[in-house]
Amino acid sequence: QVQLVESGGGLVQAGGSLRLSCAVSGSILGILRMGWFRQAPGKQRELVAGITSGSDATYADFVKGRFAISRDSAKNTVYLQMNSLKPEDTAVYYCNAVRSLNVYWGQGTQVTVSS
C-alpha cells in the first residue's frame, strides 16, 4: 500500500503562486510514476503534471511554462510549484502514484484562485 497526503492548497489571487506538496509513505519501492491531477466542479479529473522514477516530467499544455513538478527522494515528497495562477486553475488537486498494477490517490487539496 502507498499513502499520499497532499498539502499546500489555499486561496490566492490571480497571478499569484502556490506550492503543493505530496508526502508519500508505505510501500514506496517500485513506484513508477507520480502525478498531479485536478478536478473542477462539474468537470472530469485531468492530468496536470507527471514525473517518472527517473525524474522525467510531463505537463498538460494548459500549465506549461507556469507549473513545475519535482521530487525530493530524501523527503519522499513530490511538489507542484504553481506560478501565474489563473481563476480557471481553481480545482481540487490530487496526488497520484502508480506502483505495479495499482494506482493510489491522495485525499486532495483545494486551490482557489480569485480574479
Image (cartoon, helix red, strand yellow):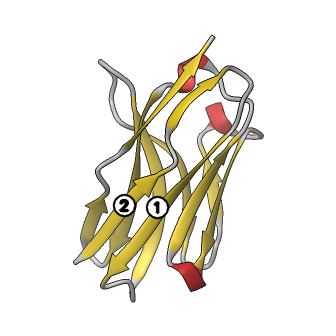
Looking at the rendered structure, the secondary structure element under dot 1 is strand
In this rendering, would 17 be left or right of 11? right
Q: Is residue 45 placed above or below 5 in the rendered structure?
A: above
Q: Residues within 10 Å of mark 2 (few under 14, many from 20)?
A: some
Image point (65%, 36%), residue name: 63
- Residue 87 location, x and y as percent? 58, 17
Contact? badges 2 and 1 (CB < 8 Å): yes
- Residue 22 location, x and y as percent? 46, 61
Give the residue type at disc 2. Answer: Val
Quadrant for the N terminus in the image: bottom left
Q: Give the numbered dot on residue 63.
A: none
83 or 51, nearer to the observer: 83
110 or 31, nearer to the observer: 110
Image point (68%, 20%), residue name: 14
Q: Residue furthest bottom?
A: 29
In this rendering, would 39 be left or right of 88? left
Image quadrant where residue 93 sits: top left
Q: Residues within 10 Å of mark 1 (few under 14, many from 20)?
A: many
Give the residue type at disc 1. Answer: Cys
Looking at the rendered structure, the secondary structure element under dot 2 is strand
In the picture of the structure, the residue carrying the numbered disc 1 is: 22
Image point (41%, 55%), residue name: 6
First in sequence: mark 2 vs mark 1? 2
In the picture of the structure, the residue carrying the numbered disc 2 is: 5
Quadrant for the C terminus in the image: top right
Q: Is residue 6 placed above or below 24 in the rendered structure?
A: above
- Residue 104 location, x and y as percent? 28, 63
Mark 2 and mark 1: span between their CA atoms? 5 Å
Image point (40%, 72%), residue name: 24
- Residue 106 location, x and y as percent? 32, 56
Image quadrant where residue 60 sits: top right
